[in-house]
Image (cartoon, coloured by chain):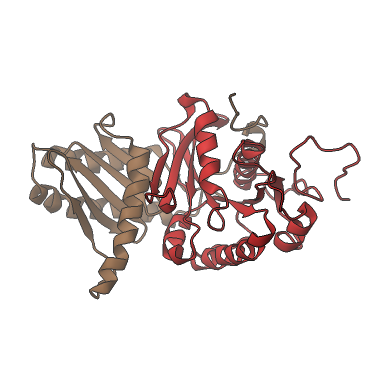
Chain colours: A red, B brown
Amino acid sequence: MSIINYASREIQFKIVYYGPALCGKTTNLNYIHQRINPLNRGDLVSLATATERTLFFDFLPLNAVVIKGFVTKFQLYTVPGQVIYNATRQLVLRSADGIVFVADSQWEKMEENVESWKNLCDNLVLQNMNIEDTPCVLEYNKRDLPNIAPVNYMEYVLNNRKRRLQSFEVISSTGQNVFATLNAVSQILLHKFSKQSEAPQGAPLPVAIPLEPPQSTQKLPA
Amino acid sequence: MNAIPVLTIEDVATLDGVLGDFLKKTEAELTVVIDRGGNVISQCGDMDMVDVTVIAALAAGSFAATRELARRIGEIEFNALYHQGNGNHMFMNSVDDETIMITVFGTRTTVGLVRFYSAATAQNVATVLKSLRSNTHGFSFDAKDISTAPVFVDHP
């Protein structure tokens, strides 16, 4: 867990992008790094193989002023998605304050998505954390590809639980909804530490936040 | 309600004193105390020579990665790691189960001196942090103090 430094009035939060191999976690960070105001970010550090596969992790530090009187530092990490690197995923998850689970929307990747989600839940338990109490959003990535599963199906597979997570349709290669996803997880984790955190939060929309603005017929659940 | 542990102004002053004394004795350039998740807890010395946030993330990863090496020879972990460069070097030692201390130093001192003083410094740092973690009173915000505007903005 983060520590507040009251002398420098700084707070640090750690957000981890988690998901199966080649789902687009590093692409998310690359887009954020390219598009965010350079004054608000540090260097993007990638520990990757010669073929650009994440070997250890990617790391991007960001600064923001979102809490009155404090400088808030967000540290974005990705985990290596390949199955064999589970020990590395466990160490990157250590002290995580928020999680973005990146799922690959292609039909043939659905089994890997489910395996990766289970792996995330298992690894959180090893850190004495659980998915219910950890700020987390779902990102259905690669929505521009032709062979993708419908959002309702992805919701059924990955978000079928009593307390559903906020989810987003994303095209990380073009950046669509990349910032929306990051902002959502940031707000959820900030409010986790607010004095009114036990107040009921707005329920997630019935389907993922779409790429286009929501239709007027879409309603929040009662 | 969840609360974040607070490093008070007094805690920071105590840590600064401990780390400042360490730098004075060893003539090292920079020392940083981090948690094992890569968050910076305290820092002292020449901040301009490196990006401390990045160093913290990489050092936490490096320390964790070598745990596996340690296990292969029957150790739980290596208590200290030393990376030798041509002019600048890095020494990392374990403070407690949650914390690591990183020291960056150049040609003005030796690894032996850094190693010698880092042991006592780590103990002093551990004492401060132990009382911090045992303190049940954390900090939480007023929801109205959190900006409702998007935290991060996509600049075309």
Quarter of the figure with residue A191 = top right
In this view, A156 is above or below A9: below
Which residue is at 48% across, 61% downward?
A82
Q: Residue furthest front?
A: A146
Q: Is residue A48 or residue B150 the one in the foreground?
A: A48
Q: Residue furthest bottom?
A: B74
Q: Position of residue A68 (x, y in %)?
A: 57, 29
In this view, A160 is above or below A17: below
Numbered-mark total: 0
Relative to A147, B11 lies left or right: left
Relative to A131, A96 lies left or right: left
Q: Where is residue A19 in the image (x, y as percent from the top left)?
A: 57, 56
Q: Position of residue B64 (x, y in %)?
A: 34, 59
Q: Where is residue A159 in the image (x, y as percent from the top left)?
A: 72, 59
Which residue is at 21% across, 41% downward?
B104
Q: Can residue A115 be seen in this view?
A: yes
Q: Can residue A15 be seen in this view?
A: no
Quarter of the figure with residue B97 = bottom left
Q: Is residue B58 or residue B142 the one in the foreground?
A: B58
Relative to B81, B5 lies left or right: right
Q: Is residue B58 or residue A49 the one in the foreground?
A: A49
Q: Residue furthest right?
A: A217
